Amino acid sequence: MKIIIIGAGEVGFHIASRLALENKDVVVIDKNSSSIQRVSDQLDVQTIEGSGSNPVVLEQAGIREAEILLAVTDSDEINLVACLVANVMSPSTKKLARLRDAGYDEYHEVFREKAPHIDTIINPEIEVVKSIERMLSVPGAVDVAEFEGGKIKFIGVLLDENARPAGARLTELASIFGENRPLVTAIIRKEELIIPTGDDYLMPNDIVYFISRDDKLMETLRMFGKQHEALKRVLIVGGGRIGFRLAKELEAKAVYTKIIEADEKRCTDLAEQLNKTVVLHGDGSDQEILREENIQEMDAVVTVTDNEETNILVSLLCKRMGVGKGITKISRFSYFHLLSTIGVNLIVSPRLSAINTILQHIRRGKILSAVSIKGEQAEVIEAMAMETSDIVDKPLKRLSFPKDALLAAIIRKQDIIIPSGESVVKPGDRIIIFAKRNVVPKIEKFLMVKLEFF
């Protein structure tokens, strides 16, 4: 599979890194010489310094042989033009583009159906807002993903030492939870990601990832010591595009919302565009302002400024002042491993959201969704089992499934099956697989349709 990536920023770099490790043929294009040098020095991919919207550069990159073009520069306009030129030169190449400006929202479908015929448009800010809403809706969750249209939840919770499962072996969970016990798919302990066996224990301060049916979720969370309370009051620090989108969604759900924004003109714009949200001009890291706004009465604080250090500082400050839930926007992947050690556990990342969407569309096999876990250490993949793929019509115990992967659920029509070694995946089933990054290429081979199918 040949993939051309236009843009060597954080998203382009990390996608190229993932694909290079999976032995895909990758070409990265960027006008910035230092960005290209970074890719060239650290990754085993081809690099071209130049404009990704230039037909000569695209020809040099091999656009006519490329299966996929990813346009992920920081400029929406460059991404659009690159897709337009690529569409003229190679109509069969699948095109994915990152478009962040809200002004393009209403034109996504037009851009798919008409030139430049972009197959997938990625707006990471929309995905981040969805992630924040999911976190706000699930008590005690540090990570939330949905599959099968929300019928299945993939949840990560921080295990308190007084929770009933703390100290229990996984084989003992049936006696704690009964027949509705969740399937624990991963444990993060001291920054190490573990795919557990029945002999592993759940320890206090672990982040425990599990699969649950949506209708059993609240009951499961209570067993983990997480109590559900209605979301009534939210403070947003940062009135940029993400803060604005989130405020609109919270208004629609009748959640009392406040925004603190440092830019006075932006405050005026927000006040004109929002109906019920209280817009405050000020510095969200000012402890006096937070105290005046009775921060301790807020159900949650969401920090989404453009300054990551400010987001971290405000989250820590609000936690110290008594706020139960703080969600922090972070883009730099290098920060991810540090944050849990200082008490910042609820993290959203526009760049990681963009990567998740891209992965869904470049994986081989009929992939329905893909979610990165713990930065990029692992993936949860939702896929359709195809008739001639290697994963169907055999008991799971007879499959040479990779050691660092787990088939977590089988969805067959209306039934959700937690599989055992005797379970058999049938064509047309939806399956959910948890896999460490190093074994994802092997999982792809299981999901691929054999050529004779065609």
Image (tube, rainbow, N blue to C red):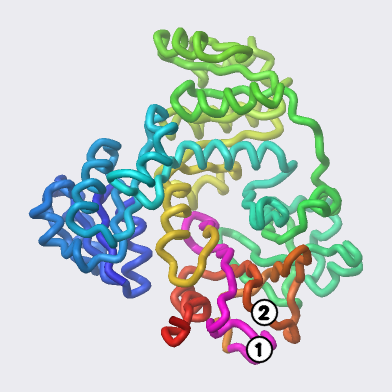
Mark toward the start of the polypeptide (2 vs 1): 1
On the rendered structure, is 418 left or right of 65? right
User: In the image, what residue occupies the spot 49% across and 12% down?
Assistant: 282
Q: Position of residue 125 (x, y in %)?
A: 46, 37
Q: Which residues are magenta?
A: 371-399
Measured Cα–Cα span from mark 2 to mark 1: 7 Å
User: In the image, what residue occupies the spot 62% across and 61% down?
Assistant: 189
In the displayed structure, 71 sits above or below 373; it is above
Q: Position of residue 62 (x, y in %)?
A: 16, 65
User: In the image, what residue occupies the spot 59% across and 38% down?
Assistant: 132
- Report the quarter where the C terminus lies: bottom left
Which residue does the numbered mark 2 point to in the structure image?
A: 425
On the rendered structure, is 409 left or right of 127? right
Count every numbered label the image shows and give the total: 2
Residue 113: assigned label:
none
On the rendered structure, is 428 left or right of 35? right
Residue 236 can be seen, yes or no? yes
Task: Say which element carries label 2.
Answer: loop
Residue 42 falls within the magenta-colored stretch: no
Q: Position of residue 97 (x, y in %)?
A: 34, 47
Residue 394: assigned label:
1
Q: Residues within 10 Å of mark 1 (few under 14, many from 20)?
A: some
Query: Which amino acid lies under the numbered mark 2 shown in the image of this protein?
Result: Val
User: In the image, what residue occupies the spot 83% across and 64% down?
Assistant: 181
Give yes or no for contact between labels 2 and 1 (Cβ–Cβ under 8 Å). yes
Residue 390 falls within the magenta-colored stretch: yes
Q: Position of residue 60 (x, y in %)?
A: 10, 61
- Report the quarter where the N terminus lies: bottom left
- Given residues 147 and 31, the one toward you in this image is 147
Task: Say which element carries label 1.
Answer: loop
